């Protein structure tokens, strides 16, 4: 017997319609690439988005086609999020930090019909235009007076494209299983893989991350997503904020500490989301000018783990709670959040900081388990570790146009490739990536924990640990660091000796000028392995 309830579909266009009707004056504030500030309300955004929907239809975009975006976080990109999926097409966000070869690959793989791009990215597309012959035309996100010269064919000006279009548009209704957006993985090994989100998965994810287990947003929130809108739908924030009427502050392409603080201060931001490297830059800027964060209550850290030193600095200097958000492109992207709980509030500060280092508890809808190499489930005791497996309504069940389903097991679980623990309270903590964990003389050593410990040493700005071949122990940890002040390897080693087990201490520490990163800011350890894999061969452990 079925329940006798209306079977309304959950569509992305409904979010903006709701925001305009209920939170119409709530602001979307964004910074242009030329640093001017634009502001309007959700009601204004809906009017412009309907104009864009009419323009897309006039260009010939139809349901099921992919439309690429190559843009920073601003109001025009926000309009594209809603208009493209609203008409039944697919919003394909392209990460400009990927290599030109990867970008041309994913544009062709997605069969993009049009690409909407910020002026900053014209040279990038000009360099690969001969490789992406399937693209019909390019729309530059600018006014007429901002339009730069370009060799790209079939170019439109965004604002001129919207001129003359009607503000009346009736969103089509279709099954909420319809594809809505397409994001590609960073492609650290092999070609990038596409993850095709549906309307239902997008709304389910947005509602989950917005709530009390997630970002804790409401109509009084002023949220700054520094996480790019070209990466995994900006962690769902452009949808969550509109859904709840939060003020949405979009930083454009200016992600340095000074520019971010200007927006944080002027727009009374109380919630922020981004990767650790961005927050390191903000903290250094605040130190240099002697300022504190007065309105910010919480900062969400994702992409990689926040070191203990960052958690302590935000708390002790700025009274800001750091909470981890863990996920992957395949999870839309968020699967677990370490939010502030009543139990945490009662903990001594040092104990709470240690708990905050965990990636958090799964959001409702996400199931997690850890398994050993034989697929046997491991206990949730906080000590046993294994491969992290997940399933849920916003977890991918396959890759876009891909026949390789090796990450998707036959019983419906997705293998994340992470090694983790889960404790009796449900907190999950990433120990390492399966490919990065160090196996030394039968012991497993976490590269992540060594990296976090190194970042706690004053002057160390970035740390990367790889498994180097050793003729006695098989593998031993090798630490590479960047520094912003003179530090000797001996000083760092002494610091690590105070916080790590002896067997985990790196056999060598190398100071380098820079460390390589992929398109989403994660360390490219495979490149470092090629260079330093045999660095320790024939060395003896003292």
Image (cartoon, rainbow, N blue to C red):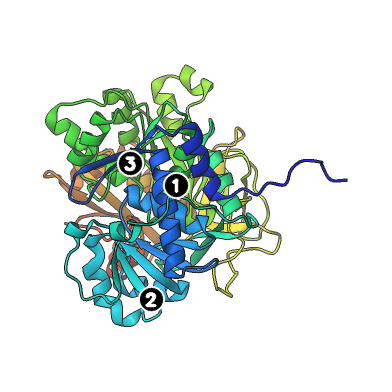
Tag 2 residue? 136
The residue under the point 37% across, 26% down is: 297
Q: Which mark is residue 251?
A: none
Q: How many numbered markers are drawn?
A: 3
Which residue is at the front of the view, 271 or 219?
A: 219
Which residue is at the front of the view, 523 or 383?
A: 523
Q: Earlier in the sequence, mark 1 or mark 3?
A: 1
Residue 379 x %, y %: 65, 43
Residues marked 1 and 2 touching at CB (< 8 Å): no
Looking at the image, can residue 268 be seen? Answer: yes
Q: Residues within 10 Å of mark 1 (few under 14, many from 20)?
A: many
Which residue is at the front of the view, 462 or 63?
A: 63
Residue 514 x %, y %: 20, 57
Q: Earlier in the sequence, mark 2 or mark 3?
A: 2
Tag 3 residue? 453
Residue 473 x %, y %: 41, 60
**Viewer-nearest of discs 1 and 3:** 1
Q: Which mark is residue 235?
A: 1
Residue 303 higher or lower than 221, as above or below: below
Which residue is at the front of the view, 423 or 333?
A: 333
Q: Earlier in the sequence, mark 1 or mark 2?
A: 2
The residue under the point 41% across, 29% down is: 221
Q: Residues within 10 Å of mark 2 (few under 14, many from 20)?
A: some
Q: Quadrant of residue 314?
A: top left
* Element class at badge 1: helix
Q: Quadrant of residue 469?
A: bottom left
* Element class at badge 2: loop
């Amino acid at each position: 017997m079925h329940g006798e309830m209306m079977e309304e579909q959950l569509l992305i266009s409904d979010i903006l319609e709701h925001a305009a009707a209920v939170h119409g004056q709530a602001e979307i504030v964004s910074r242009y690439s030329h640093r001017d500030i634009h502001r309007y309300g959700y009601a204004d955004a809906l009017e412009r988005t309907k104009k864009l929907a009419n323009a897309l239809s006039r260009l010939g975009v139809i349901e099921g086609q992919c439309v690429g975006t190559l843009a920073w976080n601003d109001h025009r990109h926000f309009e594209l999020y809603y208009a493209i999926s609203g008409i039944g097409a697919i919003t394909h966000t392209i990460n400009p930090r990927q290599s030109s070869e990867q970008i041309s690959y994913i544009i062709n793989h997605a069969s993009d019909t049009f690409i909407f791009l910020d002026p900053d990215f014209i040279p990038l597309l000009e360099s690969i235009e001969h490789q992406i012959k399937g693209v019909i035309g390019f729309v530059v996100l600018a006014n007429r007076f901002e339009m730069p010269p370009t060799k790209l064919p079939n170019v439109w000006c965004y604002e001129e494209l919207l001129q003359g279009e009607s503000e009346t548009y009736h969103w089509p209704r279709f099954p909420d299983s319809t594809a809505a957006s397409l994001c590609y993985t960073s492609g650290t090994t092999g070609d990038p893989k596409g993850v095709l989100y549906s309307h239902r998965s997008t709304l389910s994810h947005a509602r989950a991350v917005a709530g009390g287990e997630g970002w804790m947003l409401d109509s009084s929130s002023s949220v700054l997503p520094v996480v790019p809108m070209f990466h995994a739908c900006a962690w769902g924030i452009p949808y969550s904020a509109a859904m709840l009427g939060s003020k949405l502050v979009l930083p454009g392409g200016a992600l340095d500490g000074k520019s971010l603080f200007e927006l944080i201060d002027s727009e009374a931001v109380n919630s922020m989301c981004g990767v650790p490297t961005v927050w390191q830059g903000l903290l250094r800027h605040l130190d240099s000018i002697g300022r504190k964060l007065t309105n910010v209550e919480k900062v969400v850290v994702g992409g990689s783990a926040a070191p203990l030193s960052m958690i302590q600095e935000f708390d002790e200097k700025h009274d800001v709670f750091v909470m981890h958000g863990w996920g992957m492109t395949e999870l839309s992207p968020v699967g677990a959040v370490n939010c502030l709980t009543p139990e945490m509030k009662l903990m001594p500060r040092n104990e709470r900081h240690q708990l905050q280092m965990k990636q958090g508890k799964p959001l409702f809808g996400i199931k997690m388990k850890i398994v050993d190499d034989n697929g046997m489930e491991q206990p949730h005791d906080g000590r046993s570790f294994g491969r992290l497996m997940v399933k849920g309504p916003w977890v991918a069940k396959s890759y876009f146009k891909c026949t390789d389903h090796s990450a998707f097991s036959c019983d419906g679980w997705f293998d994340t490739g992470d090694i983790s623990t889960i404790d009796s309270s449900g907190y999950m903590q990433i120990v390492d990536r399966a490919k990065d964990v160090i196996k030394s003389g039968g012991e497993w050593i976490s590269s992540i924990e060594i990296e976090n410990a190194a970042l706690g040493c004053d002057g160390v700005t970035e740390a990367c640990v790889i498994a180097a071949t050793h003729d006695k122990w098989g593998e031993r940890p090798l630490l590479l660091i960047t520094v912003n002040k003179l530090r000797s390897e001996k000083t760092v080693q002494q610091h690590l000796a105070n916080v790590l087990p002896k067997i985990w201490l790196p056999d060598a520490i190398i100071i380098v000028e820079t460390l390589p990163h992929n398109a989403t800011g994660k360390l490219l350890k495979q490149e470092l392995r090629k260079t330093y894999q045999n660095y320790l061969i024939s060395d003896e452990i003292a």
